[in-house]
Amino acid sequence: MKKNQEKLFIEQQADAYFDRNFTKGIQAASKEHKIIQLIKTIDLPKTGNLIDLGGAVGSVAAGIIKICPDWKGTVLEPSQKATKAGSKIFPWIDFICGSVAKKKDMPNKVFDLAIISMVFSWIDRSLLSQAIANIDSLVKPSGYIIIRDFYTPFPRANNYHHKDGIFTYKQDYTSPFKSLNIYTEIYRESGPVKHSNFDNNDPYDDWTLTSVLQKDLFDRYRRNIIK
Ligand SMILES: C[S@@+](CC[C@H](N)C(=O)[O-])C[C@H]1O[C@@H](n2cnc3c(N)ncnc32)[C@H](O)[C@@H]1O
């Protein structure tokens, strides 16, 4: 029987990711981090608020607040271990223990910037559209979404090497947002990264895509001026 990927992640794998990656210490993301570099190129307001979905211990949120000190940060993350450890190191960041795929876990406010980095590829396919709707509902008009994930031109489902029954789903996660026609893609970069090599016969196996989408609820529609 197919296992529910959401349940496996929430109950085990989110904490397992924390155990594998953060036992040696927690730091704010450095200036060299791809998302921090990207932030400097976006025309963000001086004050604002961001949410990092699946933001683990809050390193990326803390790195952004370092360069945008008047911003407020929220991290939504299913790992109890990660949210507990993160809130000790970065007490100025709000941590929510929850899943981006659950409507009830979403904070009841909107943000200037939502980040979802290396998370979509593990969302249970039955909950993907709910996760997309949840993210859209968190973004203010003119606000931004940064999406970073594995990218392949045609969908792939690779076995997750840390746990049987989980798949790493690779595809273009910007497409559903762009199909709504309320987001303009203002930055897009794709290409190989060194750390992934599941299938050496697949030329796109080690590709990621980083994209910045800006919400525009008005001007993307050409309005008919004839009455
Ligand atoms: C590969 S890590 C990426 C961490 C961080 N976003 C980054 O880019 O460094 C994947 C993260 O997604 C989280 N995650 C998994 N399923 C999730 C879900 N349904 N909702 C939110 N986060 C989830 C994991 O617990 C983990 O912290």
Image (tube, rainbow, N blue to C red):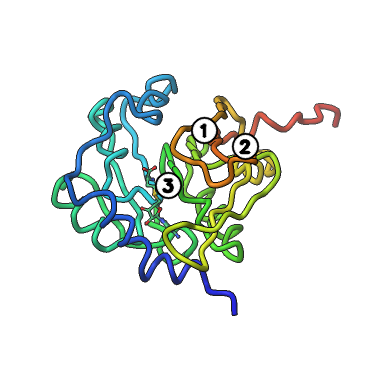
- N-term-proximal mark, 3 vs 2: 3
Q: Tell me the amino acid under the disc marked 1.
A: Thr
Expressed as whole percent of the image width and height from the top left, the position of residue 36 reads: 35, 28
In the image, 157 versus 134, the foreground residue is 157
Image point (57%, 29%), residue name? 190
Q: CA distance from mark 1 to mark 2?
A: 15 Å
On the image, the x and y values in percent for residue 101 come to: 49, 61
Q: Is residue 99 depicted above or below 91 in this figure?
A: below
The C terminus, quarter of image:
top right
Q: Which residue occupies 54% across, 48% down? A: 136
Identity, as a three-letter code, of the amino acid under mark 3? Val
The numbered mark, 1 or 2, whose residue comes first in the sequence reads: 2
Location of the N terminus (image quadrant)? bottom right
In-image side of 122 versus 24 (left or right): right
Front: mark 1 or 2: 2
Q: Which residue is mark 1?
A: 210
**For mark 2, what is the residue?**
204
Question: Label 3: few (<14), some or many (≥20) within 10 Å?
Answer: some
